[in-house]
Image: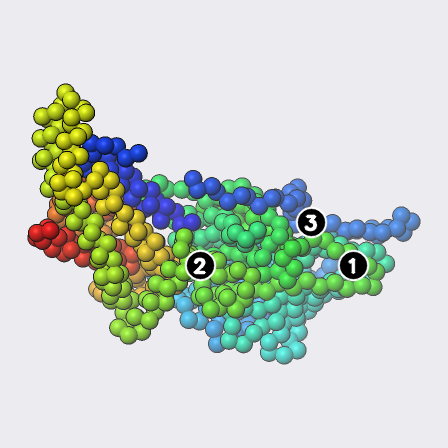
Amino acid sequence: MDRNFLMFMATSMLILVVWQTFLAPEPAVEPPVEEAPAQSQPVDLEPSDPDRDPVAPRGSSNSLEISDTSDDIPARSVEKIRISSARWDAVFTSRGGGLESFELRDFVDKTLPDEPRMDMVTRGDEWDLALATPLRGLGHGDLSKLDYDVSRPDPNTLIFERTLRDITVRKTFLFEPDSYRFRLRIEVGNGTDHHLSPNFATVWPARAREGADFVEFNLGVYTNDALEMYVIVPPPALLFGGSGSADTQQYTGVEWVGAHTRYFLAAIVPDLPEKAQVQFLPVEPDREAVAKIKFNQDEIPPNGRLDREYQIYLGPKQTAELEAVGAHLDEAILKGWFPPLTVFFASALKTVEGVVGNYGVAIILITILVRILMAPLMTRQMKSMKRISAMQPEIKAVQEKFADDKTKQSEEMMAVYKKHDLSPFSMFSGCLPMFLQFPVFIGFYYALQGSILLRQQPFVGWMDDLSQPEALFTIPGIDLPVRLLPLMMGGAMFLQQKLAPQTAMDPAQARMMLWMMPIMFTVLFYQFASGLVLYWFVSTLIGIGQQALTNRSKD
């Protein structure tokens, strides 16, 4: 669950509780956690040496002497292999037979100098190669440091192969034209007279980089029908700041594992999920971690061969692309509590933008449409509060007149409610439309927060990226950004509070509430993407107009 959204919901509920406590009129007759998902069971991945693949030699009389070093294997020249498609440019290396870079042609980071392409490989200090395969248990040290022979039998196939003392290791990359996905097949041929038990482990390093795309950065694993997160870089926050995960985490029965930002995903999908195991290891707090995936060990008999396969996805979080891979990869997209509503609003945004040509204008138009659809509920709420406010002088007079006779006071107050065709429960029915709007707000919230459609999309003027907080300018010396949109939103909320019907609360409390809600929401929304703030600002402006019309009406 997105932490900023949880903060917003907690703040909203707190304000609602305060409103009910201080703002709502006191009736004469009183009207009569979410559990966290269970953690996947950890599996022992040799914590003392998580890279090591044990060897299981057979036979007591002629057991094999296993060497765990590759120092005596002569080095070869390193070859860089560049492969391109319509969507990406990749660089592989013969040393380790892994991936050095995978740049997406259609996505650049405009927040950095020279606007570099998005590189899906996040090479770290401990692991500088993606899809490395240590295979230590074969007895020749870390094979991710070994030089492989390279061959390309066709444009869509890349093979790394090396034979070491009758053990042949082959890594085959099989590419799909015009796709962000490809396959990695790891084969081990056993030419010895002993059994081998490799686990076909591969590694994905995850080190955060500069740029807007890495403001949030996580490892994730889909297991037991749930997405488990390992936070590398927590989202920025003016309030309630957090830190990244710091402990080793282990899982078994894995459908996919990967590293992802808000809009991009690097995922490894094993061909045998029930045998797959994953380990997350911290390297540098709030900066770097590594994901390791392997299979349960299966023995390879003498003169036998065994292979395992991973499907790799390196690209944007686009629903159609992720669903084509399967394995619940689309769960990496933020969808919130009501996924159908989130999907609907994301589709609506794309459709409207296709007509008007600007996602900011699309947000405004959809907000207007949502408010029109919700107008009957909102009008009912506002009229209810207006009628409750109108009877407050009579309620106060009854309370003062019968202050010493609670029974009589209750009877007279019930008569006042009846006179105005209300009940002590009316205040709660007035809040009902507010709760009915939450699913709509949640769906639109996640459509704006999680959809890659808004990435680097401009609105007007300085609002050049609806997926990021806008900044008109930054105050020198303290580096505080001045964000006009949340400030205008706070002012609009103040005006809306000012127009709301007044209740019989203490004037000092009334003044406090008048300022508290706008200030709290301004501070909270100061860190949100400008697209979301734009939605709330426009919605508040419409609410002001609706409140003004309700105040002028006679019913």
- Please indicate whether residue 284 sits to the left or right of residue 114 in the image: right
Q: Which residue is mark 3?
A: 52
In the picture provided, is 430 more to the left or to the right than 120?
Answer: left
How far apart in space, not on screen, are marks 3 and 1 (Cα)? 17 Å
Counting residues from the start of the chain, the first of labels 3 and 1 encountered is: 3
Residue located 78% across and 59% down the image: 300
Q: Position of residue 39 (x, y in %)?
A: 55, 43
Regarding mark 2 in the picture, which secondary structure is present there? loop
Q: Look at 34% across and 53% down and name the residue there.
A: 439
Question: What element does badge 1 sit on?
Answer: loop
| Category of crowding for the residue at label 2, using alpha-carbon neighbours closer than 10 angstroms: few (below 14), some (14–19), many (at least 20) | many
The kind of residue tagged 1 is Ile
* Residue 400, x across and y down, in percent: 10, 26
* Badge number at residue 173: none
Q: Earlier in the sequence, mark 2 or mark 3?
A: 3
The residue under label 1 is 300
- At label 3, the amino acid type is Arg
Q: CA separation, marks 2 and 3?
A: 34 Å
Q: Amino acid at mark 2?
A: Ile
For the residues carrying marks 2 and 3, which lies nearer the camera in this image? Answer: 2
- Report if residue 145 is visible in the image: no
Rendered location of residue 146, percent (x, y): 67, 60
Q: Is residue 204 above or below residue 359?
A: above
Find disc 2 in the rendering and name its residue.
333
How many discs mark residues in the rendered view? 3
Residue 137: x and y, percent?
73, 52
Q: Residue furthest bottom?
A: 154
- Badge nearest the viewer, 2 or 1: 2
Mark 1 crowd level (few <14, some 14–19, many ≥20, 10 Å Cα): many
Q: Is residue 35 left or right of residue 53?
A: left
| Residue occupying the point 57% across, 69% down | 182
